[in-house]
Image: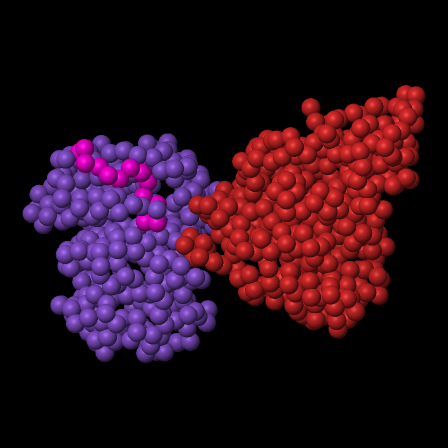
Chain colours: A purple, B red
Amino acid sequence: MPSLLQRDAVFYRQKHLLAIEGLHPPEISHLLDLAESYVLLNRSGKTQRDLLRGRTLINLFFEDSTRTRTSFELAGKRLGADVINMSVSTSSVNKGETLLDTAATLNAMQCDLLVVRHGQSGAPNLLAKKVEASVINAGDGTHEHPTQALLDALTIKRRKGRIAGLTVAICGDVMHSRVARSNIHLLTTMGCQVHVVGPPTLMPAETSELGVTVFHDMKAGLAGADIVMMLRLQRERMTRGQVPSEREYFRFWGLDAEKLAYAKPDALVMHPGPMNRGVEIDSAVADDPVRSVIKEQVEMGVAVRMAVLDTLSRGEGRNEP
Amino acid sequence: MSPDTLFSGVRIVADGVDLIGDLLVRDGRIADFGPALGRPDGAILVSEPDAVLCPGLVDMRAALGEPGYEYRETIASASQAAAAGGITTLAALPDTMPVIDDPALVRLLRARGEETGSLTILPYGAITRACKGEELAELGLLQEAGAIAFTDGGRAVGSARVMRLALSYARGFGAWIAQHPEDPSLANGGAATESLYSSRLGIPGIPAAAEAMLIARDIRLVRLTGGSVHFAHVSTAEALDLIRQAKNDGLSVTCDTAPPYFDLNETAIGEFRTYAKLSPPLRKDSDRVAVVAGLADGTIDAIASDHQPRDADDKRLPFAQAAPGGVGLATLLGVTLAHVHNGEIGLAAAIALLTARPAKRLGIDAGRIAKGAPADLCLFHPDRIWKVESGLLPGKAQNTPFDGRALEGVVLGTWKSGRRVFSRS
């Protein structure tokens, strides 16, 4: 584990963090190791407020989010950055000119680190081409949510002692989930067996080509799993006819104690939040103090984001154009 | 009276013609051609060793910015790009603003083409009012005003009932229908072909089957009505199989494709490159290979530019929100020649796909080299190299999906009715 002071030991050589796809195992390991040291620091009550002193971090959220925004805000403040939250209401952003106008504004503000959440896949990539700041993707459309995958991996690593060799079942609305995509890339890159489980209407095309095994049945998909990762099901999936009803979804793909029993006896339950209790996950499982690590995921989120901000602020590298 | 022009020592290639020799232009028409002609007094001599002289290209599918989208492209700028690309005849799509569903607009476009002096514009009329796919436009009056055929441009006629009426009614006027073959209920909301690639990028997909389904439906409607259909920018293997079969069955079915569909595949999207967002979307490489095969075996009747001018604000958006379409006038010949150079199609067949065969489908006297034929000509050097660069293309719109592509084959000059309208500087 690199110490916080070991500034030479940087293996992450990119300007931005736009996606997990394309990262190499040493880059992921570096971020996870650094994040782990921040977990210890945070728990000890010490701070590291000089690291980002004088740096400006802007949280630019085009979609509502409490959890991710607060997590980045806390991470930035714990490292001493000046943190500004900009929430852009979705109604005023139906034209992309606004996105690029925003980029111009941010350049004028001398922003160093830009955290972006946007409803459109690829919006952070577009911004990254136009702003001088390092861009961190905090979730774009149905593309990626890299810091979520990192915090999930850190949670797994701390609980299981390793990542490689584990079997992870990712369950639910894979098609519309940026969390699922980032996790699939991270976990397959780091040597996990990944099962994806869900109804065929919520499975993206050619998912198995991503190096995962696709299941439509929870019993088969959860067999042998060390980790059961549930995804949020958005209610609009019902109105658009991709699943007939909540009760049918819960019957076949909702995680309850009965279905959890298909996984390994010590399998952990994860969820990126916010949960739809009784739709994709039963409260008894979500709140199980032994099996559920959902609250721990939130704690890991702050540490992972501190590691990402720390790494990118060192300006070691450049993403390819 | 303009002076004669003598092309000397060039390779003359056209439907049924492939020789090295001379060609004489007089009074806007081809006066003679053959192995060696004498030079009349006062004739302009054009002598370019190793160059190929072919008929001016006939582009059977291109969108112009006028009327309504002049910020993207004007007829003047499009005609410059066309001349630089060797194109002398162009069939213009009707989904402009307003839509070309009124005879006066057809006459206007024809006249605007004549004003350019370099480009014959053949307007398509709309199949349905405002291209909404609901009520038939006045096909008879539009044809009388000069509409070459009917299409709703980039929009498919989604209703089988309306398409049946269109095919049936147009048949009464001896007219045909060009369809954008994509089932709207499957394709709407999609932005890239549905595949591993779209799954990875989290871009909503359009399944390849959306194209095949509408083509299968329309072939059945041709059987039902005795009508005549043309499928535009065909992009999938499955669709070509259906068209091949329909042609074998003797139905009046034709199709075209455009350079992106035989030269690029879905990976051109890269990391959300909106210039590679087209409609239909760029497909998997197996589909691209099938399009090449369709060109080689004659299933595809024409290569069209499928020119769709867009400005930066249409494209500098997140991928799913960006407007689809790419410019294609200046690269039509060069990209086609790339597939001659790599041995996939013969030169004469490629030229026919760009000239005589679309002219035949359009029913016009163009795209041929014969005594007395109009002297619409394109002179190009088949091996000279250039690089496609967005920002440096002729014309106003610069949204090329081929940005950075090196091409062999440079247009040296273009002649419209015997008058030189483009000259490579």
Q: State which quadrant residue B69 falls in.
A: top right
Q: Residue at x 24, y 63 (%)?
A: A167
Q: Is residue B297 above or below residue B134?
A: above
Residue A167 on the magenta span: no
Q: State which quadrant residue B326 falls in.
A: top right
How far across and how far down the image is residue B63, in percent?
Answer: 68, 46
Residue B287 falls left or right of residue A148:
right
How far across and how far down the image is residue B120, in percent?
Answer: 79, 41
The answer to whether any part of residue B191 appears in the image is no
Q: Residue at x 35, y 49 (%)?
A: A21
Depth check: A294 or B29 in front?
B29
Q: Is residue B281 above or below residue B405?
A: below
Residue A10 on the magenta span: yes
Q: Is the magenta region chiefly helix, strand or loop?
A: loop
Depth check: A48 or B102 in front?
A48
The magenta span reads A7-21
